[in-house]
Image (spheres, rainbow, N blue to C red):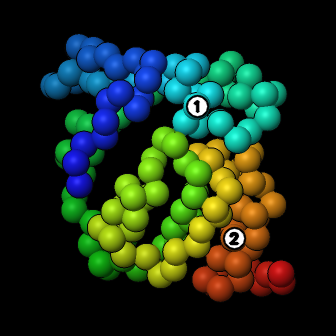
Amino acid sequence: MEKIDQSKLMDTEWKTLVVPEKAEPVTTMLFGPEFMAKALYQLCSPEDLALGKSLVRVASLFLEDLSKMPAFTEERYGSVPKVYIVCGRDEAISVEYQRWMIQRTPVKEVMEIEGADHMAMLSSPVELFRCLARIVHKYGRTMPCTI
């Protein structure tokens, strides 16, 4: 899979910071208001977008930390049933890229919310709840659930 097209990240800001306690520079990102409006919250209410913009913070990609993590094993990571919910109108992570991630990390089931943007909990809350309830009902071990 090729890298993400940087032009699609619009006004997202990337910075590399030297942190005295870290051996490697730290890469950070901050979603810009245009990216948030057009790629993350494009199907959400103006109020949800405004709240998201007010709460956005600089985030680390944790690349150094991830590079030091042990490989995932079938005994640990593979023992947890995984379900992926494809957000059909996600402009931040294309459906093609979502499907590529699914192929690389096998899942028990793939569900799709065709009308959801990246913020499915805001753009399609009822459909997301239905998916999550089905997942709990089908794969939950201790909590009974009726749909």
Q: Is residue 28 left or right of residue 94?
A: left
Residue 30 shows in this picture: no
Q: Residue at image x 22%, y 48%?
A: 2
Q: Amino acid at mark 2?
A: Cys
Badge 1 density bin: few <14, some 14–19, many ≥20, Cα 10 Å: some
**53 to the left or right of 25:** right
Q: Residue at x 55, y 36 (%)?
A: 39
Q: Position of residue 124 (x, y in %)?
A: 74, 54
Q: Residue 65 placed where, x, y %?
A: 27, 40
Name the outermost residue toward the left.
23
Question: Which of the two discs, 1 and 2, sits closer to the camera?
Answer: 1
Mark 2 crowdedness (10 Å alpha carbons): few <14, some 14-19, many ≥20: some
Report whether residue 144 is seen.
yes
- For mark 2, give the secondary structure: helix
* Viewer-side residue, 82 vs 6: 6
Q: Amino acid at mark 1?
A: Lys
Looking at this view, is 14 or 68 the one in front? 14
* Label 1: which secondary element: helix
Residue tagged by mark 1?
A: 38
| Residue plotted at (83% across, 81% down) | 147
Quadrant of image for the N terminus: bottom left
Tell me which label, 1 or 2, sits earlier in the chain: 1
Query: Which residue is at a point 27% across and 72% down the rendered structure image?
Result: 73
* As drawn, 78 above or below 123: below
Of residues 25 and 83, which is closer to you in this image? 83
- Residue annotated with mark 2: 131
Query: Looking at the picture, how far across and down is residue 40, in whole percent?
Result: 58, 37
**What's the mark number on residue 23?**
none
**In this image, 65 relative to 56: left or right?**
left
**The quadrant where residue 119 appears:** top right
